Amino acid sequence: MKLSARNQFQGTVTHITQGQAMAEVIIKVGNLEFVAAITEGSVKNMGLKVNDAVTVAVKATEVMVGK
């Protein structure tokens, strides 16, 4: 799979919370966790399950930090 996003990380799915239309997928990358909200259809089409190896791609126009 080739993507234009330069920020790509290899990780492992640790948890999937399924809703009615959207799912929350948690991916562990080293000591970090990424949380992605994706459609239920995407979870099913990719056959995502806990312990799957996945690629996290991050493409954002801004990053906010608060304290």
Image (spheres, grey):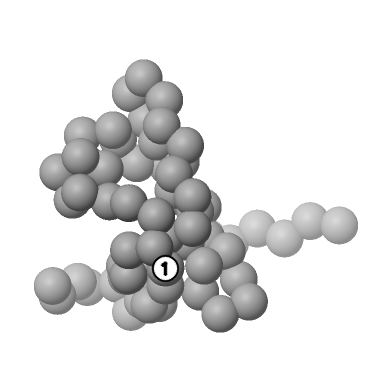
Which is more toward the observer, 59 or 57? 57
User: Residue 42 versus residue 6: which sits nearer the camera?
Assistant: 42
Which corner quadrant of the image does residue 58 belong to? bottom left
Q: Which residue is mark 1?
A: 12
Q: Residue at x 27, y 51 (%)?
A: 48
SS of the residue at dot 1? Answer: strand
Would residue 57 be visible to someone looking at this image? no
> Quick one: quadrant of the C terminus?
bottom right
Q: Position of residue 13 (x, y in %)?
A: 42, 60
Residue appearing at x 52%, y 67% in the figure: 28
Estimate how packed mark 1 is, as few (under 14), some (14 to 19) or many (20 or more) residues with alpha carbons within 10 Å. many
**In the figure, is residue 24 to the left or right of 57?**
right
31 or 66, which is in the foreground? 31
Residue 17's place in the image compared with 28, above or below, is: above
**Residue in the image at 22% along x and 73% along y:** 4
Image position, residue 52 (x, y; %) = 32, 63
Label tally: 1
Residue at the spot 32% in from the left edge and 70% down from the top edge: 53
Q: Farthest residue to the right: give it.
A: 67
* Residue 14 or residue 41, whichever sits in front: 14
Q: Is residue 11 above or below residue 33?
A: below
| Residue 8, x across and y down, in percent | 36, 76
Residue 18 image point, x, y percent:
41, 32
Residue 26 visible, this orientation:
yes
Q: Is 32 situated left or right of 48 in this image?
A: right
Q: Tell me where residue 45 sits by quadrant.
A: top left
User: In the image, is residue 17 above or below residue 29?
Assistant: above
Amino acid of disc 1: Thr
> Horizontally, is 51 left or right of 3 in the view?
right
Q: Is residue 39 above or below residue 64?
A: above
Q: Is residue 29 left or right of residue 4?
A: right
Where is the N terminus found, in terms of image quarters? bottom left
